[in-house]
Amino acid sequence: MEEGAYGLRKIIHVDMDAFFASVEQRDRPELRGKPIAVGGGSARGVVAAASYEARAYGVRSAMPGAIAARKCPDLIFVKHRFDAYKAVSEQIRSIFFEYTDLVEPLSLDEAYLDLTHNKKGMKSATLIAEEIRQRIFKETRLTASAGVSVNKFLAKVASDINKPNGLTLIAPHDIPDFIDALPIERFFGIGKVTAEKLKRRNIHTGKDLKKLSKSALSELFGKSGPHFYNICRGIDHREVKPNRQPKSISCEETYSNNIRSQEECHEAIESLARRLKDRLEKNRFKKRHKLEGKTITLKIKFADFTQQTRSKTFPLPIGDDELASLGIALLQQEQIEQDIRLLGLGVSKLNINESDDPEETQLTFEF
Ligand code: DCP
Ligand code: CA
Ligand code: CA
């Protein structure tokens, strides 16, 4: 890809085709070529995924099963098998990591990759995207679509264009025309409601969107206004952020005056436990998972700079309200002979893999 006003990055977005439905058709040959819906089979259930055969009848994800059945009388409802999807997700992620560490999964079936400096030293992001799609097919017998461009916004829009089993490149010199012609519904982040609002103002394409002033965009999109101002000009500086999961979460404090008494120690640990709880809560909110640890660790640095860590692991995750008392129990485990200059409290063996997928939290309906 050539250099230009858009920057030098090579970003791809890879997304599996009809993900849950394709996994079911792969594993149950009798479902191949048939209209199927994963989920939506129960009285109030909603369709999670529809095979392409079902989509031809207008069946879509998030559609109530009853409506889907009316649209497509031959629709076969299939129960979800989350473990199978998760296994495929891990397979594709390990393929991604062979090319770059800058992999940002958005859900089980899709990710952004920054291939500007890739591990294979390949120049063409398009060739890598094609290679990745072939590897995915070889290893999982499932198809993926990919978009290649200079930033996340364009790569994501591109991956949708030749779906299923397609590859789309939006090269720098094509960007202005591409965006001008792009219907507003195709802009990631413009939902149905906003799209209707825009259309009432006679805004249908990227070209129309570009005519809006910064303040008009901020009125429409709130704090995302500047983002929309940029993306309709093909500019998106957001980095591909690998969401590395923490292995442990801890807090520590070095005391300006060494701690001597048991009381001071208890107070210090209680204060650390409050901070730790705070950090756990913030991470839970950000990452949308339960985030609790099974191991608690107390770190003690003494006046002579020697250091000790004491920990205990439990069969069940530790609740926030137990952090202080467990920390104090670790302190009391062994006689303290010296003044203390630093204390640290942390949890590890985190349960981050149990529900760290946005997909899973997105599943608010029944299957
Ligand atoms: N999913 C879900 N609930 C939704 C949307 C999706 O449970 N409201 C699940 C089922 C999908 C998977 O996530 O198979 C991936 O979602 P996509 O939006 O990528 O849709 P598909 O992969 O099914 O289809 P496409 O080929 O359009 O990407
Ligand atoms: Ca998909
Ligand atoms: Ca997806």
Image (tube, rainbow, N blue to C red):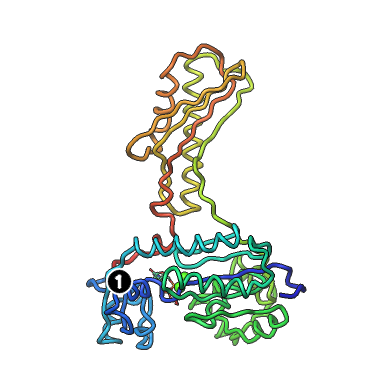
Pick whichever, 264 or 108, lies toward us.
108
Q: Tell me if I can see residue 51 in this picture.
A: yes
Q: Quadrant of the C terminus?
A: bottom left
Q: Is residue 217 above or below residue 75?
A: above
Where residue 183 appears, x then y in whole percent?
57, 84
Where residue 308 appears, x then y in whole percent?
52, 23
Left or right of 113 on screen, residue 248: left
Is disc 1 surrounded by few (<14), some (14 to 19) or many (20+) residues within 10 Å?
many
Specify the quadrant of the image occupied by residue 301: top right
> SS at mark 1?
loop
Q: Residue at x 51, y 46 (%)?
A: 246
Ligand 2 in which quarter: bottom left
Q: Is residue 137 above or below residue 117?
A: below
Please name the residue that numbered disc 1 is placed on: 39
The kind of residue on which mark 1 rests is Gly
Q: Is residue 278 above or below residue 253?
A: below
